[in-house]
Amino acid sequence: MATPPFVIGVDFGTESVRVGVFALDGTPVVFAAEPYPLYHPRPGWAEQKPEEWWDSFVKATRRALQEGRISKETIAGVGVDCTSCTVVVMDEGFRPLRPAIIWMDVRAADQAQRIAASGHPALKYNGFGSVSAEWLPCKVLWLKENERDVYERARYVGEFIDWVTLRLTGNWVASINNTSIRWYYDRQEGGWPVSFYEQIGLGDLLPRFPSRVLDMGQVAGTLLPSVAEELGLPAGIPVAEGGADAFVAMFGLNVVAPGKMAFIVGSSHLMLGQSAKPFYGKGIFGTYTDAVMPGQYTVEGGQVSTGSVVKWFKEHYAGNAAAVARERGVDTYTVLNEWAAQVPVGSEGLIVLDYFQGNRTPYVDSLARGVMLGLSLKHTAGHLFRAIIEGIAYGSEHIFRTMRSYGYVVDEIVAAGGPTKSRLWMQIHADVSGTPITLTRVANATALGSAVLASVAAGLYPDIPTASAAMVHVKERIEPNKERHEAYRFYVDRYIETYPRLQDLIQSIVRHTSRA
């Protein structure tokens, strides 16, 4: 049985908030989750109401304490992470003026194109290429151009994490994480890129940002008495400065120094690593100054649709596997994994591009689409399932190769997320990349990462590396097979060649169907 003191890690996701209570060795004592609504007023739009975040957070926190039979006096600190690029605008009384525009909202596509066309040096974080419509400056520029009255009344503009920290502590502060990864903040270059904001028409936005930018793990403030009573927690305990969910997960995977890569896998894939030196270029997001650890630089890569493609295949094209699974009383994925394991490397000439919802890196191309290349009558459901997994792994390796082309190499990949339950999938990733994959004991690396920050803010550990080392424990290490790695090189090369050859054709089809 875990012993106090305990810390709380709060993970505000896209559809729900998860509250975890952790012992100081990283052992989870209890988890509780509560959903909140997601609104889509128009195609491509996505919004949420901050007060609904809060109501769910209160319910989840109280339920965690109750179900875990935890006395509030044993809680030493709180850490929080939230979705990034979720924009909140408030009046002078810190009251939200409209629903938050959340990360997946892409209404600002036109503004993103114009910002990219500015050619400002701050765009180094985008690899001097396309700018994502998800990022805060694009969304705020949309507000200024389309909801001018709201923009004029907006005294404070920030992100999800800033709003939550404000509610918890009463302090209006920003995280170095969000500001550097999505707001173009660069501490080494003087902080805010004033000329950039002026050039894109948002020179009047900077006074609305928080004036203090804190490193993750710093004390953002202490828990307000009224809030403590609402949550059932002790007043005055420290609240750690948090950040974006996937980046906070790096602490829950003990990826806090160069040499390791955090591999957050699920419906999409995200790669996050640390570098001792900055580098910038096409196909790279980052490197972000001080975004995770002071004095280091964070590099980012991502695939839009990965696990979502696997789920798509299972739900729509795996009827035979589902029937066999029902007869055996097992999950459909179990049967598909067994069939795929019998298929040789390369799925006998079948290559799948995983760009079903576009490409995040290295192309940053929202018009990219999926491709199945090399189909024959010999190919079975097992071939298709394996080829999809292999295609996802090829996409990851394409990102790793792009990073390697800039001299950035990792020795170990630390993975978290639902797909880690499939040993076949993780082995294919290891074989394709030629890099060991480590799995950790606590599956919810994001909530654990917030707990790591809470432990540092509470003074229970002297710094983040010490806390991560103490609270994160390795469960398994998957070594790559050298022979399979060599065999996969041919297929990775063909995967990388495919989209440039088909890009114009695919984009013309997408544009045509979007007009229909």
Image (cartoon, grey):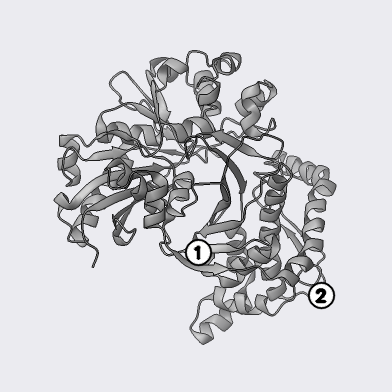
Q: The C terminus appears in which quarter of the rendering?
A: top right
Q: Quadrant of residue 320?
A: bottom right
Where is residue 271? Give x, y as percent.
58, 49
Q: Residues within 10 Å of mark 2 (few under 14, many from 20)?
A: few
* Quadrant housing residue 66: bottom left
Mark 2 secondary-structure assignment: loop
In the image, 74: left or right of 438?
A: left
Secondary structure beneath disc 1? Answer: strand
Query: Residue 422: where, in percent of width, then height?
Result: 55, 70
The residue shown at (64%, 69%) is 317
What is the three-letter code of the residue carrying label 2? Leu
First along the sequence among labels 1 and 2: 2
Q: How many marks?
A: 2
Can residue 11 be seen?
Answer: yes
> Image check: 512 left or right of 123?
right
Percent from the top left, x then y, of residue 157?
41, 24
Q: Residue at x 69, y 23 (%)?
A: 117
| Residue located beneath label 1 in the image | 439
State the CA–CA distance, disc 1 to disc 2: 37 Å
Three-letter code for the amino acid on which mark 1 is drawn: Leu
Give me the residue at 68% from left, 33% from top: 130
The quadrant of the rendering that contains the N terminus is: bottom left
Above or below, 172 relative to 463 = above
Left or right placement of residue 319 versus residue 96 in this view: right
Asked whether the viewer can see residue 142, the reply is: no
Estimate the x, y position of residue 256 in percent, counting from the top left: 49, 47
Q: Nearer the viewer, mark 1 or mark 2?
A: 1
Q: Which residue is mark 2?
A: 377
Residue in front for this viewpoint, 166 or 95: 166
In front here: 241 or 65? 241
Instruction: Look at the picture and state if 61 lies above or below 216.
Output: below
